[in-house]
Image (cartoon, rainbow, N blue to C red):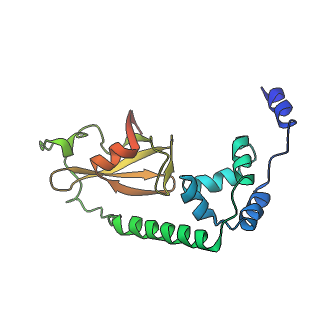
Amino acid sequence: MDRDRELLDGIGPRRLTADEIKQLLTQKGWLQGNLALWLGVSRIHLGRLIRDVRRPRHWDLAFMSLPHLTTRENSILTDLRLAREREQKESKVEVKRSAAEVLDPAATASGPGYRYRGVLVPGAVVVVTASHVGEMAEEGEEGEVVAVRDAGGREDYLIRFLAGEDWFDPDSFDACMAETGKEV
């Protein structure tokens, strides 16, 4: 397998270094955050790709093929990215860890907002199924449910990833995660 990788690496142009990619982005007028938005990946994921010397080859081709941005296009992307970042910050719920917010697992509330009752409990492991969860996690990354609270007609789940934690309602959870059946 390693021999095959060596042979494949010898075909075509060598992989770009992180510095070469950054220089290429600058020359073409791209900010890393704007490129991440345009590609539909998180800035964290894009940063990892840039630094990964063994990234899939198609990423080097993508970086080399980027169009040159006009000042107007760059401004539009920057405005959109900043607006999305503001919305994301405003939508975050301040994490409060008072005993009153944490649900008793034996509670008997039911309905669509309680569909994960007894499944998503503190210690449950979840996996990201979307391309990313904000700037916190990438597809395939696992997180841990650290708290559950009643939000009036539904449960909310505080889920911790390596890059951060946030509260998710059942619909948000369905859109980007799945339960694994594992516990820590």
Q: In the image, what residue occupies the spot 69% across and 54% down? A: 50
Identify the residue at image location x=14%, y=44%: 107
Query: Residue 96: x and y, percent?
Result: 30, 64
- Vertically, is 68 above or below 126? below
Q: Give whichever of 31, 158 is nearer the camera.
A: 31
The reply, left or right, for residue 158 in relation to residue 82 is: left
User: Where 17 falls versus 89 (above or below)?
Assistant: above
Q: Position of residue 142 (x, y in %)?
A: 47, 42
Percent coordinates x, y for residue 28 in the rendering: 72, 64
Q: Residue furthest right?
A: 10
Q: Quadrant of residue 122?
A: top left
Q: In this view, does 61 lie to the left or right of 151?
A: right
Residue drawn at 56 percent across, 57 percent down: 38
Location of the N terminus by quadrant is top right
Q: Which is more toward the observer, 167 or 75?
A: 75
In the image, taking residue 71 as reference, residue 15 lies left or right, namely right
Q: Up-down: is 53 above or below 27?
A: above
Quarter-of-image position of residue 165:
bottom left
Residue 67 seen in the figure: yes
Quadrant housing the C terminus: top left
**Residue visible at 34% across and 65% down in the picture:** 91
Q: Can residue 105 be seen in this view?
A: no
In percent of width and height, residue 175 lies at 36, 45
Q: Nearer the viewer, residue 161 or 44?
A: 44
